[in-house]
Amino acid sequence: MTTTVSRPDVRIQPPVRPHPSKERWIRRAPLLPALIFAIVITQIPFLYTLYLSTLHWNALKPGTHEFIGLQNYVTVLTDERLRAALVNTVILTAGAVLFSMILGLGLALLLDRSFVGRPVVRTLLITPFLVMPIAAALLWKHAIFNPAYGLINGIFGGSTDWISSYPKGAVITTLVWQWTPFMMLILLAGLQSQSTEVIEAARVDGANAWQVFRRMTLPHLRQYLELGGLLGSIYLVNTFDAVFSITQGGPGTATTNLPYEIYLTTFRKFEYGEASAAGVVVVILTIIVATFALRVISSLFRIEANS
């Protein structure tokens, strides 16, 4: 006779998961110290700068902080010197970004090929981007552009004062030398993400090198070119070292950009309110460019995730 022993009904209970909103906060909790630090370091000073931009505050007249609303912004947008500084900022930024992207594309195409010593060449080409901006500006000012002992006049002869004769060209050349490696790295990453099978198939079908570059490589690099241009613009719109070290904004106001004009307004005119308003304008322009950069980056991530 068989005896059947009944076992108690034991059911495996699913783990208790916290509420989705609580779970999100648990995941984000380790980031709170960094977020608080970023707010204290960046946002509180920016809010104070907004407050200063509404005051008529000249350091030569202590104790007089008159509230004038948006009058400083009107001055920034209508003052002739500040308008000239805005135009110079656009010219210097656009010129440096454009030429560095063209040179960076050429170097990226060369480094995308296999040859002996490619890692060494790549390291040497990256070196200018690792030089401090102030050191790069002084190097070009004294070692290359100097009319008495500079490298250019030493090679080609003559005694041309390149900085006085071509001030914008001198600043743009220095920025291009330093930022070309940055563009090269971004475009080289884009080239190495391109499908080699598709290129080989196009060559088998009879496409030459120019057709492959124009119809396949360049469209593939479009988003990388946009990313490089936007990121370069974010950094170069705030250029101060090269202008201060090479030309001091001259001759006249030929190379005075917005960051250097803000410096002059603060430490030469001592107009703290006006300088704060100009700084806020620069921040707004940078945020606009950064917004487009973030959109390009997110689109690249989506393409990478779908591939």
Image (cartoon, rainbow, N blue to C red):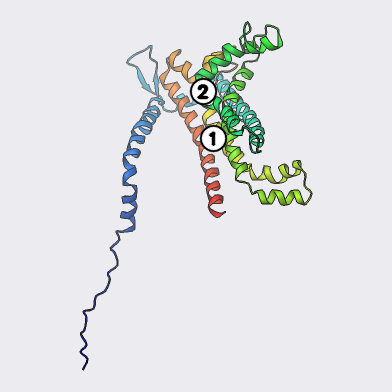
Q: Residue beneath label 2, please?
A: 131
Asked if 162 appears above or below 110 in the picture, the reply is: above
Horizontal and vertical percent position of residue 198: 68, 51
- The disc labelled 1 sits on which kind of residue? Leu
What residue lies at 58% left-to-right and 27% top-to-bottom?
124
Task: Find residue 102 and report its image quarter.
Answer: top right
* Residue 17 x, y percent position in the rendering: 30, 61
Q: Nearer the viewer, residue 127 or 160?
A: 127
Residue drawn at 45 percent across, 29 percent down:
280
Residue at the far right in the pictured view: 206
The secondary structure type at the circle numbered 1 is: helix
Q: Image point 40% across, 29% down: which residue?
A: 50
User: Does residue 182 lie above or below 219 as drawn?
Assistant: above
Please report the residue visible at 34 percent of the width from the left and 17 percent of the height from the top: 64
Q: Quadrant of residue 62?
A: top left
Is 77 placed left or right of 58 in the picture?
right
The residue type indicated by label 2 comes to Val
Q: Nearer the viewer, residue 16 or 235?
A: 16
Question: Disc 2 to disc 1, how far (Cα)?
Answer: 18 Å
Work out whether mark 2 precedes mark 1 in sequence or the reverse, and give the earlier one: 2
Label 1, on which residue?
231
